[in-house]
Amino acid sequence: MVTDEVKELPQLKALYDELWSDARNMIKDMNKSIAVYLFAGLFSLIFSVLLIGNGISNWNRIFSGDSSTLTYVYVAAETFGSVAYVIYGITLLRGYRKLKSRYSKLIKMEKSLGTE
């Protein structure tokens, strides 16, 4: 009687052969994808600083009495958006750190093999 595991062996072999032949490119692509987390997180934090500065300016306008109803709506959305961008940026940077440490061994192995 042939078990399911034995039936899956040819499929697994084909999968491993494909992974084996494309391993170096996969590691390079993975490293680039991990770097996207870093850059997106940094840009989110930089943009949040700009939003916070603009929000402070608009809050000062409200407190000075020189504002309209649209300014209140804009400041509320801006305040929420700046907090969301800070959280998003920190989350992306934590994801970057986690992925970088998780796959550091593969990345070191690929670098030790040299580039083509």
Image (cartoon, rainbow, N blue to C red):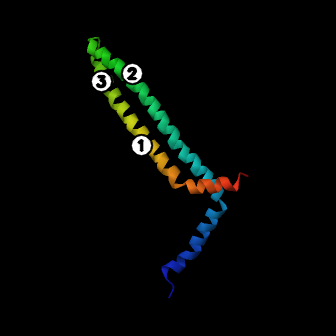
**Residue drawn at x 28%, y 16% as measured from the top left:** 62
What residue is at 53 percent from the left and 80 percent from the top? 6
Q: Which mark is residue 79?
A: none
Q: Dot 2: few (<14), some (14–19), or many (≥20) neighbours within 10 Å? A: some
Q: Position of residue 44 (x, y in %)?
A: 45, 34
Q: Please tell me whether residue 86 is drawn above or below residue 57 in the rendered image.
A: below
* Residue drawn at point x = 40 percent, y = 26 percent: 51
In the image, 47 versus 17, the foreground residue is 47
Q: Residue at x 33, y 23 (%)?
A: 74
Viewer-nearest of discs 3 and 2: 2
Q: Nearer the viewer, mark 1 or mark 3?
A: 1
Please identify the residue farthest to the right as the structure is shown. 116
Measure the C-alpha gap from mark 1 to mark 3: 27 Å
Left/right placement of residue 86 relative to residue 42 reads left
Decide: is 81 above or below 7.
above
Disc 1 crowd, CA 10 A, few/some/many (<14, 14-19, 20+): some
Q: Position of residue 27 (x, y in %)?
A: 61, 54
Instruction: Compare residues 98 and 92 and report the one nearer the observer.
Output: 98
Helix, strand or loop at mark 3: helix
- Residue 26, by quadrant, is bottom right
Of mark 1 and mark 3, the one earlier in the sequence is 3
C-alpha distance separating marks 1 and 2: 23 Å
Name the kind of residue labelled 1 in the image.
Thr
Proximity of marks 1 and 2: CB atoms separated by less than 8 Å: no
The residue labelled by disc 3 is 73
Residue occupied by mark 1: 91
Q: Position of residue 112 (x, y in %)?
A: 67, 55
